[in-house]
Amino acid sequence: MSAGAGEAAGLPAGVTLRPLAGGDDLAACLEVQQAVWGNDPRELVLPIVLEATLRAGGLLGGACDEAGRLLGFVYGMPAARDGRLAHWSHLLAVRPEARRLGLGLALKHWQRARLREQGVERAYWSYDPLLAGNAHLNLNLLGARVVEYVQEMYGGEVQGTAGSDRLIVEWVLVAPAGTAPAPPREVVGLETAALPEAGPIGVAVPGDFSALSAGDPVLAGRWRAATRRAFTHYLARGFCVAGFRRGDPPLYVLESGT
């Protein structure tokens, strides 16, 4: 399949993908961010920073409707990892009313095609491990793999009680989509006391963490503590994240690397 066909596959009628540049496009990116994350300046990338990044070799692409309105965008910058040229994908944002249209996946495919044209082989980004939809996109649909768990990546006050723990993933740009892992032997959840040691092990997450955070921030904080405990425990002992299973509850499957 050609890069163009891969980018267009599954897009709603009238939606196009294109590079973004210039004042109007960058202002629209800020508007999309505000629609997704609100007006907290600590969570927004301003147009002046987007412009500087583009001039330094960054990549910014958007999905626009027939009227030219920006529905979502993907944004990143040149990076180095383990001594190799790479790409850090900092933002993937889609307006709430345009979600479930496949725009996030299409934008990532667009990003991959542009990076491969530049000779880049790997991209990295972070995401909140408690967001089940993001886990499905990153691990199952794109085939990225978890390489690191970072506690409070953006500081404890950025996202309230639940904090800002993140998983770092590596996306090999020629890799196929992920496959669903086998069911775990045991599942670690909110009330788990002793962590099991024999894998594969499931680490459960809420079905809708965003709604949970808005409605019960204390419970959201408990979920953060429980998953932080599990991920840091198992990753430090050589386990790897084999994949993500959707269901009730959704869960990560961790397998021993030995």
Image: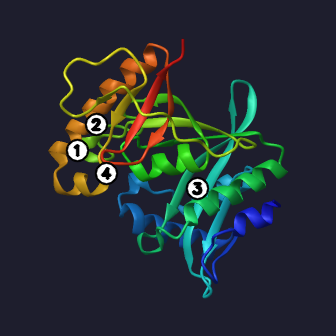
Q: Residues within 10 Å of mark 3 (few under 14, many from 20)?
A: few
Q: Residues within 10 Å of mark 2 (few under 14, many from 20)?
A: many
Q: Quadrant of the C terminus?
A: top right
Residue underneath mark 2: 224
Of the numbered discs 4 and 3, the one sitting upstream in the chain is 3
Of the numbered discs 1 and 3, the one sitting upstream in the chain is 3
In the rendered structure, are the residues bearing label 1 and label 3 in contact, judged by CB atoms less than 8 Å apart? no
Say which mark, if any, is on residue 220.
Answer: 1
Q: Amino acid at mark 2?
A: Arg
Residue underneath mark 4: 207
Give SS at disc 3.
helix
Residue 62, image x, y percentages: 63, 68
Residue 107, image x, y percentages: 63, 61
Of the numbered discs 2 and 3, the one sitting upstream in the chain is 3
Q: What residue appears at the point 30 percent right and 37 percent down from the top-left corner?
A: 156
The answer to which of 22 and 209 lies nearer the viewer is 209
Q: What residue appears at the point 57 percent right and 66 percent down from the top-left corner?
A: 103
Of the numbered discs 4 and 2, the one sitting upstream in the chain is 4
